[in-house]
Image (cartoon, rainbow, N blue to C red):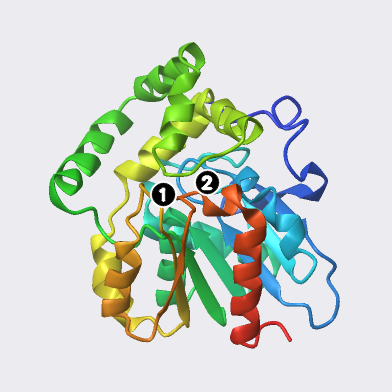
Amino acid sequence: MPERLNWDREGRSWPNRDASRFVEAAGLTWHVQEMGEAEEGRPLLLLVHGTGATTHSWGAIMPILARHFCVVAMDLPGHGFTDKPAPERLSMPGMAKDLAALLAVLDIEPEMVVGHSAGAAILMRMCLDGLAHPSLLVSLNGALLPLSGMAGQFFSPVAKVMARSTLSAHFFSWSASVDRRSVTRLIDGTGSKLPRRDIEWYELLARNTGHVWAAINMMANWELGPLERDMAKLRTPLVLVAAGEDRSISPQTAFRVKEIIPAAEVEYVTGLGHLAHEEDPQVIADLFLRLARTHAILG
């Protein structure tokens, strides 16, 4: 099985490195970041990244949020510096259970949870299955519904074929090493414009076969149909943040989810793409703070 990133090597200049520690849970060693003073009455905020990302995705926004919250983020299983599980555990229910096990070891119950892209789906699954009980769930460009049309028919079967062999991960990592523009093109394809230093983090991840292996297997095991069927049962207050320039997850997805969950709120953000929290961390942090106050999580 491909090796994950090495903390003593690739992690030497990791964003918010001083906030990092490693925690054993669900048979895995997790890379966890915690920031913000644990003052009495300060709410706990959990951040969950999407497929192919890590804690670095929250690197700029975490210090802003930590002025108001105790903030916790982690690398999902197989991503970044967290151990890789068996491939079948990289499903939505599997990752929801493993993340719940991590929260139990950390002995935390977040009052507000934010998931980006696939991270939003994991958090919704946790809420539906009684694995988390936050006062507010925020979906940031959430990948909450199955892909439609030809994309939906093509995407998962191809990922399943690729996941059968580690050669796919080696090939993608090799390609990222040979053609440095390939990662920039992928980022541009999300509708987001990131500075060169931020793109370099994704290049580092793309060159690591273990990280790529996890992303491929996560996509191969990803089934959004059951989530779509169950989401009408969600009782956790939900805010759907949709960025107008997102070319990975159509902003219309948020409005389609609201049709299923009429009580959900939609926040439409203009001028930003799929990686909105990396493009303009202050704007997105201000939005999260406003939502926390509106829902009486912050005073």
Q: Quadrant of the C terminus?
A: bottom right
- Disc 1, SS: helix
Q: Is residue 186 left or right of residue 223?
A: right
Q: Is residue 219 left or right of residue 102?
A: left
Residue at the image position 60 percent from the left and 85 percent from the top: 294
The amino acid on which the numbered mark 1 sits, given as a three-letter code, is Arg
Residue at the image position 50 percent from the left and 18 percent from the top: 180
- Mark 2, Cα crowd under 10 Å, few <14 / some 14-19 / many 20+, is many
State the separation of the CA atoms marked 2 and 1.
9 Å
- Mark 1, Cα crowd under 10 Å, few <14 / some 14-19 / many 20+, is some
Image spot of residue 184 (x, y percent): 48, 28
- Disc 2, SS: loop
Is 299 placed above or below 91 here? below
Image spot of residue 172 (x, y percent): 41, 22
Q: For marks 2 and 1, give the one nearer the viewer.
A: 2
Q: Earlier in the sequence, mark 2 or mark 1?
A: 2
- Do tag 2 and tag 1 residues touch (Cβ < 8 Å)? yes
The amino acid on which the numbered mark 2 sits, given as a three-letter code, is Pro
Residue at the image position 24 percent from the left and 31 percent from the top: 161
Q: Which residue is mark 2?
A: 77
Q: Which residue is mark 1?
A: 89
* The quadrant where residue 68 appears: bottom right
Extreme residue in the front direction: 271
Image spot of residue 158 (x, y percent): 22, 34
Is 210 placed above or below 277 here? above
